[in-house]
Image (cartoon, rainbow, N blue to C red):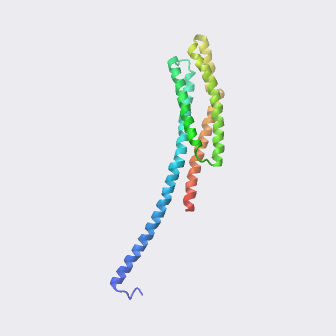
Amino acid sequence: MFKNLSLKGKLIFGFLVVVVVLLIVGIMAIIQMQGLSDNITFMGHRTIPKIINLETTMVEIQKVIVSMRTITNPNTSNEYRTKLFDNISNSRDKYNKALESYEKMELAEEEKVKYDEFKKNLLNMKGINDEILSDANKLNNLSGDEKAQLCARLTYSVTAGDWDQSMSKVTSSLEILINYVNENEGNMLVDQSQSD
């Protein structure tokens, strides 16, 4: 059949085949772009905000750790110690705001379990922090041996006592949660793209 076509017919037929192939490739590309757009929307509205809120929380907790260790140092001036109290308060406000945003998002069941474990550790740490901060607040009014003894006790608390253990639990449970979100959200996108 193709042999009997004139040169003009063969050229037209060849161009029509190319046009059909390009049309099919174009339609497939548009469909894939829509899927990609959905994935980008998913990441932008769900995955990235979750990670930003959790990472913000981690940064602010690290700031609390540094401030807590510095606040108990006997060489810290009263003025700087007062500033550290403010820094701790500001960091708490920032991580609480980030966690409020995170809690409003849709969480997977396993993610909720990991988040609840982190929150339990965070509340425990805050209670221990508050006890230490209450004592550290007295440092500005003490001098001499009393100040040195209280500083020694507080320094021990933030380097080897319950506080140090609670900080380790908080940071490790938050790291586990962040890793879970990174892996789970990524796996959800892969699963979605494979089902499309």
Q: Quadrant of the N terminus?
A: bottom left
Q: Residue at x 56, y 47 (%)?
A: 182
Outermost residue to the top: 144
Outermost residue to the bottom: 4
**150 up-or-down from 90: above or below:** above
Q: Position of residue 4 (x, y in %)?
A: 38, 88
Q: In this view, does 134 lie to the left or right of 11?
A: right
Outermost residue to the left: 8
Q: Where is residue 123 in the image (x, y as percent from the top left)?
A: 64, 33
Q: In this view, does 181 lie to the left or right of 31?
A: right
Q: Which residue is drawn at 52% across and 42% down?
A: 52
**104 up-or-down from 10: above or below:** above
Dividing the picture into quadrants, the one containing residue 166 is: top right
Q: Is residue 66 visible?
A: no
Q: Which residue is drawn at 36% across and 83% down?
A: 9
Q: Residue at x 66, y 39 (%)?
A: 117
Q: Can residue 113 be seen in this view?
A: yes
Figure disc tally? 0
Q: Where is residue 165 in the image (x, y as percent from the top left)?
A: 65, 31
Front in this rendered view, residue 97 or 133:
97
Q: In which quarter of the image is the C terminus?
A: bottom right
